[in-house]
Image: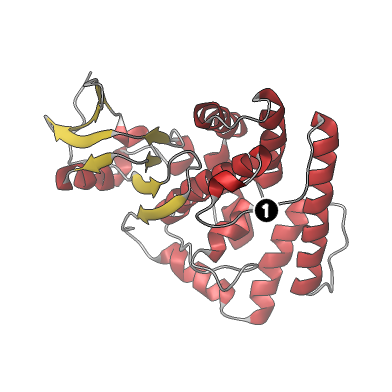
Amino acid sequence: MSRLFVKVTRDTLPQVKDKYPFIYLERGRLEIDDASLKWLDAAGNVVRLPVATLNTILLGPGTSLTHEAVKTAIAANCAICWVGEDSLLFYAAGFIPTATTRNLKRQIQLSSTRKSALNIARQMFQKRFPEAELTGKTLKQMMSMEGQRVRQLYEQKALEYGVGWQGRKFTPGKFHMGDTTNQVLTSTNAALYGILCAAIHAMGYSPHIGFVHSGSPMPFIYDMADLYKSELTIDLAFRLTRKMAGQYDKYVVADAFRECVIEMDLLSQVVKDISELFGRRAC
């Protein structure tokens, strides 16, 4: 395999929308060998990673990494996120320093007044309610519409796949107490947050400046995730519950979610959606 040199320039890197969305690793070590990033798993296998074509590396339990590995990933514009076993619960992320603050300034500008922030929020809801008349609706009214829509979607998917459904339930730190559908929802939502964190920061925006959500560490991530959950996580959760016969299997979930992300071309969609919302050309 050809070497991946640490000294790469922004011009030689694939754009966010062209990268492979993520790779999940657990029980092994991430380090550098001959200026390229390699993964050593618990069985002694060595895999060289084409880090310049990766958007995010998700590190699960039992993993370690060297300082040089982090430097190489950052140089290649690849984010690193720490996630949990089984559920892929999102714990933390190492974000990439951006070369320009132009996009961040635009985001701050749009969020700085109630009128412009509400306009962005309305556009986000319009993407989910293309037929709805949202003119004059307050943020609270639109959020109520969204809540009702999601509850109806849960019930619709439960009926479609013949899966019992008692409502969305998740208690932090007690993942295994949820039913299979809730477990899949929790894990895929967390993985979605990790991918969006990496993509949004790589584009030069901030996860911390939202337009719909507030009072949380990553409101913009939750804003954007809501655009994709019905297609990426909700349908998948009920479909996999039926496929797995009620027995949660993290490998089945991770593989199925990855396939959905690639099929949807999520990274290109994120770039397109944010550019439309903020009035920018696609990155």
Circle 1 crowding by C-alpha within 10 Å: few under 14, some 14–19, many from 20 = some
Report if residue 9 is visible in the image: no
Estimate the x, y position of residue 81 in percent, counting from the top left: 38, 48
Estimate the x, y position of residue 202 in percent, counting from the top left: 40, 52
Residue projecting furthest to the bottom: 113
Identified at 67% across, 50% down, the residue is: 227
Query: Is residue 129 shown above or below 11?
Result: below
| Left or right of residue 217: residue 3 | left
| Left or right of residue 94: residue 134 | right
Residue projecting furthest to the left: 34
Q: Nearer the viewer, residue 226 or 244?
A: 244
**Within the image, what quadrant is residue 27 found in?**
top left
Amino acid type of the residue tagged 1 in the rendering: Lys
Question: Which residue is denoted by mark 1 in the rendering?
Answer: 169
Identified at 28% across, 40% down, the residue is: 63
| Left or right of residue 219: residue 48 | left
Query: Is residue 81 shown above or below 26?
Result: below
**Within the image, what quadrant is residue 181 found in?**
top right
Estimate the x, y position of residue 223 in percent, counting from the top left: 61, 60
Estimate the x, y position of residue 158 in percent, counting from the top left: 80, 38
Give the SS element for disc 1: loop
Residue projecting furthest to the front: 177
Q: Nearer the viewer, residue 204 or 158?
A: 158
Q: Nearer the viewer, residue 228 or 111?
A: 228
User: From the image, which quarter does the N terminus lie in?
Assistant: top left
Report if residue 214 is visible in the image: yes
